[in-house]
Image (tube, rainbow, N blue to C red):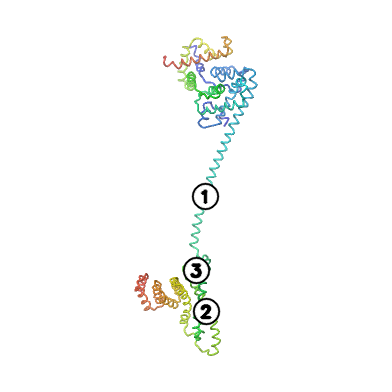
Amino acid sequence: MLSSKPNNDKVLKIFSAIRCLSRDQLPRYLDGRLTDVERHLVEQHLTDCDLCYDALQALEKEENTDNYQDLTNKLQRYVHNSIQPVSHVQKVAQYTRKEKNKEHLLTYFWMVAFIGLGIGSIYVLRGHMRNQPPVRVMAATLPAKDSVKDTVVTTAPVITPEHNTPSATAPVTHPAETSAKPLIAANTPHPDSAALKKAAALKALQKKHAADSVKKQQALQKQADSLKKAAADKAKDDDKKPDPKPEVKPAPKEDKPAPPPDPPKKETPATAINSDEYLYKAAMVYQQQGNLGEAIDRYRRIESVSSGKYVELARYQLAICYRSKGQMGKARRMFREVIRMEGSMKSAAQQALDSM
Amino acid sequence: MQQQLTNLSDKELISRARKQRDREAEGVLMDRYSHLLVAVTIPHLKNNPNLDPNIVFPTLLQRLSASLKTQTIYKANEWILHIQKGYLGKPEKNTPFYPSRDGRDLLHIENTVDKAATNIIDRQDLIVRLEQALERLHPDDKSIITQFYLENKSFADLSAATGLSRDKLRSQLKAAKGKLAKLFMNQGYVK
């Protein structure tokens, strides 16, 4: 037992695994150029490994050695070449995948950013539109509507001259008319600019435009007529009162603008309600401008001519006109009539009556 | 990468090539055994002029690569020799490699020795058992193993002493080692 003590660890050597001969070990073993320890290790391995022993035996024959180096180099190159393209391809694929991922993330980011920007700009634009007075937009749309109105208006002047003739028969009033005309003509532009700023009064404004153009044309004709008449009349007698009734003047004169809408109504019954509305709105414009007398006249006409809800509305507005004029009795009567009609304005009228 | 892989063991390279489909590990493994493969194949190429090395080696590598993914490989050198012999012997047949019973015994003992290297208690135990097995070996086998392994005598010394050729000496050593392994493995039952 004691004698075997130094050999203790060596016993394990019997069953220790040793690597195969490397490329340079093989020829060196053949040439006997190994150290004792290395040679012993190689021989230990050779007892176990058939591959290495077969290789050794093959190389020991002289004719094989020259071919060996060449073929080994070739094979190793082949192996390297077959690996490297693959690994290179793998690397390229990995790189491209990474880049693609980056690109995807970028596209997502920009998409989100653009969507956010879009929503934000829409929000801001809306806020801007809400706060901005819509004058510019209206100004753009106005001409188109005006041209439509103009076509309607053009039909009116054709009829007016006939109505004009009766007024021409009363030459006494003409001097007064000439003075009243410019007043109205001068008045109208101011409400025009004021109404332009009100989006709500836009439609009424358009109606008024139409009415104004009619009026202007009439006024021009009248002026021309009256100038002729005045030239003729002044020669006869100049001592007539120039201002018999400035307030009453508008009434007869306003008889003329009213008929023009009427003929179209008679021509096309289908548009009866439309013309009623038209009349009503024109009257409303006068009322809003403070021209109560004319408004009352127009409402009266609506009351007498048209039917349906516009009668009620007109009565109601008449009552309000009277009230604002201070003619409380008439106003009350009108309100009562409205209540009696039992229409949509009943409650409003009742309230107004109660509050008077 | 190549540098790191060359330092790895065969086992590690095989598992990498298999699990991670690492072509580089596979290539390193082939590269490691390429010279032996060439040396082993050269006699066949000499004897059979029909074989073209430009076809033989790539096909051999393909076969190795294919079997690497499917077979259990305990020792790379045995596996490579098996594939090479199978290809050159019966090219049309693909015989799977399976280690023999003796080979597995040897492998088992090698693994236990490898594990015991860092554990003193295990190692002492292993040494005692190995010596016991050695005692029970045939005297001829025992003497040759003792001379070769414990006294570090080379093949040349032994062949000079015994008058046997190197081939015979090697086969005798191999057989003695096999017997020792068998004795060692059966010790548990003998005790």
Q: Chain of mark 3?
A: A
User: To which chain does the residue with label 1 belong?
Assistant: A
Q: Which residue is mark 1?
A: A111
Element at badge 1?
Answer: helix
Q: What numbered label is drawn on residue A219?
A: 2
Q: Earlier in the sequence, mark 3 or mark 2?
A: 3
- Dots 3 and 2 on the same chain: yes
Instruction: Tell me if residue A6 can be seen.
Output: no
Give amino acid for label 3: Lys
Task: Check disc 3 and report the residue beneath it.
Answer: A197
Picture coordinates of residue A178, whole percent (x, y): 52, 82
- Choose the circle earlier in sequence order: 3 or 1: 1
Q: Which numbered disc flags the more N-terminal residue, 2 or 1?
A: 1
Q: Toward the viewer: A212 or B159?
A: A212
Residue A68 x/y as whole percent: 63, 22
Under mark 2, the amino acid is: Ala
Nearer the observer: mark 3 or 2; the answer is 2
Q: Position of residue A189 (x, y in %)?
A: 52, 74
